Image (cartoon, grey):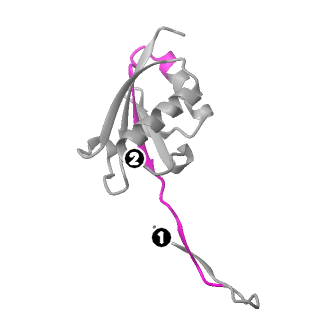
Amino acid sequence: MSGRSILYNAKVASHEDLPKQPSRSPSNKNRIINLDLNLEWDTIKAQILTAVAASLSPDILDFKDYEVQYTIPRVVTTTTALLGEDDYTTMQEVIKSSNSAKAVNVFVCPKKVRRYSLSCIDAVGSFYHLAELEA
């Protein structure tokens, strides 16, 4: 453990709540978590999923079902993807190299679910149609 902690401000929104600027939405469900900088990726991922569970109460909770991005005030000002361990390691390195980085803003939103229309297959095995519909 490094002893240095980082304040994570997790903002979780559903598609209906998500504006063009997620940081300015009053309906986001925020959760502030103070965590050690050197935690493993699985621990950070679990904390993000805990925030999602508390905010959205999904039936199934899987990290792959969410878009996760972050900013670091005055350091990383554009939203940057946080897809996995490699992205998290890069984020840690940026924080360690900056004395001013004390917080991370994390934005979480469910990915768009793709629905499919599937025509029936008859007993003879006739051609069927599979069409992707917009969610």
Would residue 75 be counted in the magenta stretch? no
The quadrant where residue 108 appears: top left
Q: Position of residue 105 (x, y in %)?
A: 38, 32
Would residue 101 be counted in the magenta stretch? yes
The range drawn in magenta is 95-120
The outermost residue toward the right is 124
Q: Which label is found at residue 90?
A: none
Picture layout, residue 3 above or below residue 84? above
The outermost residue toward the top is 3
Picture residue at 35% right of the left edge, 39% below the top:
11
Name the residue carrying label 1: 134
Label 1 – label 2 distance at C-alpha: 23 Å
Q: Disc 1 or 2, which lies upstream in sequence?
A: 2
Q: Amino acid at mark 2?
A: Ser
Q: The residue tagged with tag 1: helix, strand or loop?
A: loop
Discs 1, 2 touching: Cβ within 8 Å: no
Report whether 39 appears left or right of 9: right
Name the residue carrying label 2: 57
Please indicate, yes or no, whether residue 107 appears anywhere in the rendered image: no
